[in-house]
Amino acid sequence: MQLSIVIPLYNEAESLPELSAWIVSVMQNRGIDYEILYVDDGSTDDSWKILSDLCRQNPAIRALRFSKNFGKSQALHAGFKRTRGQWVATMDADLQDNPEELPALLELMRSEGYDLVSGWKRKRYDNLITKNIPSKLFNWAARKTSKIQLHDFNCGLKMYRSEVVKALDIKGEMHRYIPVLAASAGYNRIGEKEVAHQARKYGTTKFGPERFLNGMLDLMTVHFVSRFGRSPMHFFGAFGVLMFIFGFGGAFYMGIDKLFFNTTARLITDRPVFYLALSAMIIGTQLFLAGFIGELIIRNEGSKERYTIAETLNSSTDS
Ligand code: UDP
Ligand code: MG
């Protein structure tokens, strides 16, 4: 099997037949050995019924359904675990991404030996205020913190070497920064290709304005985790110890001063330095503990599934 196409979807019933037919025709024309893996992220419309029909008609189409809406990252995670192809592509289900781009992406992966190639929707057909401008800002911030020179981190259309998706553990809302996660896992041969983009034909966007704030917070998490995730003590511990030393030094100085030099002066507790020293020692201890607990946690965490699958189709050989 050459290419697995993972497609997360949430209430995209109208688009599915058209999308499937389009992908199948592109794959057949190019003679690519493919599978399509739909991940129904708890749709409440007819999506699953339509997927059942598609799976019955074409054994190259597989599908699984979540018991409820767990989010795009979880859907990708479930899809990635089940791919059988040598290469893995992802695309959105809403017909905004163009399947005709897939052969060219595959060609680029092969000829350049990339770990992943990300699409770049240079000309975008989305709302300017709620999508395009915030997205430019995100991408700028992501480039600055990750040093990965991509224009469009969150493009739904991407292609990977199989090994890369098997190694990635995408959770929460981290699908926005997959290239950053991949690079921090050591898969840093990352390419970019301009891709065609269409306006949404059916249905509406599943991500509201809150994507802006969430995206920024996730970016901070990704940045922080990739720098200190393997050694939280190096961050918290360092700050904690510094603060404690600062506080202890202050308290020590006041003690010596009171005992030997200014014995008749005001009470230690009347001096502002006392409160500074006290807070610094308490906060320092807390930070140190946070680092220590972080170290204990990373020694215990496995890669857990954070979703429940209700049904699967055409997947008898699932691992
Ligand atoms: N999606 C999903 N789970 C969700 C939200 C979205 O699987 O909770 C899918 C959605 O059906 C689509 C893709 O993720 O296939 C991108 O979503 P959308 O088109 O709404 O995002 P936009 O293009 O507006 O950024
Ligand atoms: Mg879309």
Image (tube, helix red, strand yellow):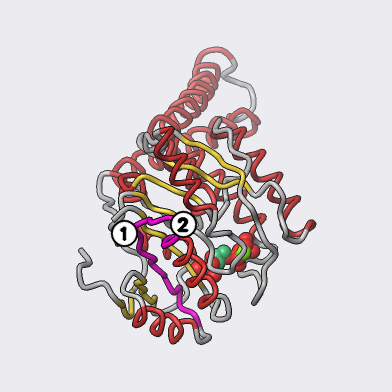
Question: What residue is drawn where x is 62% and y is 63%?
Answer: 96
Question: What residue is drawn where x is 53% and y is 33%?
Answer: 280
Residue type pointed to by label 1: Thr
Q: Which of 138 and 29 is in front in this view?
A: 29
The reply to whether the residue tagged 1 has its Cβ within 8 angstroms of ligand 1 is no
Q: Which of marks 2 and 1 is nearer the N terminus?
A: 1
**In the image, 166: left or right of 145?**
left
| Figure check: 124 above or below 229 | below
Tag shown at residue 230? none
- In which quadrant of the rendered image does the C terminus lie? bottom left
**In the image, 6: left or right of 15?**
left
Could you classify mark 2 by the number of other residues whose Cα lies within 10 Å: few (under 14), some (14-19), or many (20 or more)? many
In the orientation shown, which residue stands out farthest toward the right?
A: 129
Could you classify mark 1 by the number of other residues whose Cα lies within 10 Å: few (under 14), some (14-19), or many (20 or more)? many
- Numbered range of the magenta stretch: 27-43
**Magenta segment includes 241:** no
The reply to whether the residue tagged 2 has its Cβ within 8 angstroms of ligand 1 is no
Question: What residue is drawn where x is 65% and y is 56%?
Answer: 197
Q: How far apart are marks 2 and 1 (CA)?
A: 11 Å
Asked which quadrant contains residue 34, the reply is bottom left
| Figure check: 160 above or below 250 | below
Which type of secondary structure does the marked residue at label 1 adopt?
loop
Give the residue pinned by disc 1: 83
Q: Which of 151 and 298 is in front in this view?
A: 151
Give the residue pinned by disc 2: 90
